[in-house]
Image (cartoon, rainbow, N blue to C red):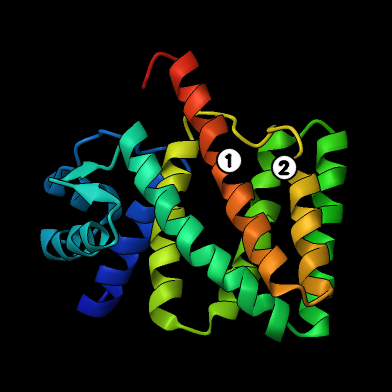
Amino acid sequence: MVPDKMNAQKLAYEYIRERMLDGTYKGGMKLVEERLAGEIGVSRTPIREAIKRLEQEGLIKNKHVYNPTAQDLIYIYEIRIALESFAAKRAANYMRTETIIELENTIKKSRNLLLEGQSKKIYNETQHFHDLIINECQNPLMIERLEEAQTIFYLFSLRFDIYNRPHLIDEHEEIYKAIKNKDEQLASDLMAKHLYKDMNFTLEIIARNGQY
């Protein structure tokens, strides 16, 4: 059954995006409309629309899968530090008890994964921890910008194992406690410090791999 126009666009978008995020379509790869149309089983028009949408999200540049540079990473972290420290401050004021419990659970799961030596799987729990706090912005535009920044960061992280950073989970626990104790300034400061350490650790990995 041939998908209708709307479903074909959605199918093409989800297919391409998923393969970018699972590393099948690697950074720098050129996306050829005709080839993708044959692969997905749709015409070139929904492929073109999907690529346009992914370009707007910053995941495609000039029909190539975005391949972030070290400087791009710094820009992304500057956005995250500014917005997520604000989100942490709001979380200390407004986060509900059930969400605080969920925040704590991400830390427990991360510690278990670390003990099992599954550092890459920690990404999902790390992402969920930050998402819970980001949602406390209660500002759709901020949330959208952060989601875009995090998606681009994830593309970058596919190239390196960056989830074994020392004290990462301990820092999450400190942020969690500040939010639980409703200490908004401490929560904000700890989040900024946490992301700054993340950035420096990642830049060191890039330098060691000769990709600075």
Q: Name which residue type carries label 2.
A: Leu
How many discs mark residues in the rendered view?
A: 2
| Image location (x, y in percent) of residue 31 | 20, 43
Residue 15 image-quadrant placement: bottom left
Q: Can residue 1 be seen in this view?
A: no
**Where the C terminus falls, by quadrant?**
top left
User: Disc 1 on helix, strand or loop?
Assistant: helix
Question: Could you say where residue 207 lies in the image, as x and y percent from the top left?
Answer: 44, 18
Q: Which of 161 and 14 is in front in this view?
A: 161
- The amino acid sitting under disc 1 is Asp
- Residue 143 in view of the camera: yes
Residue drawn 15% across and 46% down? 63
- Which quadrant of the structure image shows residue 24? top left
Cα distance between the residues tagged 2 and 1: 8 Å
Image quarter of residue 54: bottom left
- Is residue 161 or residue 75 the one in the foreground? 75
Q: Do the residues labelled 2 and 1 touch (CB within 8 Å)?
A: yes
Residue 133 location (% of width, % of height):
64, 70
Question: Which structural element holds mark 2?
Answer: helix
- Residue to which mark 1 is pinned: 198
Which quadrant does the N terminus fall into?
A: bottom left
Q: Which of marks 2 and 1 is nearer the N terminus?
A: 2
Residue at point 48%, 46% (across, down) = 154
Task: Give the answer, above or below, for where 94 lies relative to 29.
Answer: below
Residue drawn 37% across the image and 19% down it: 211
Q: Mark 2 points at which residue?
A: 168
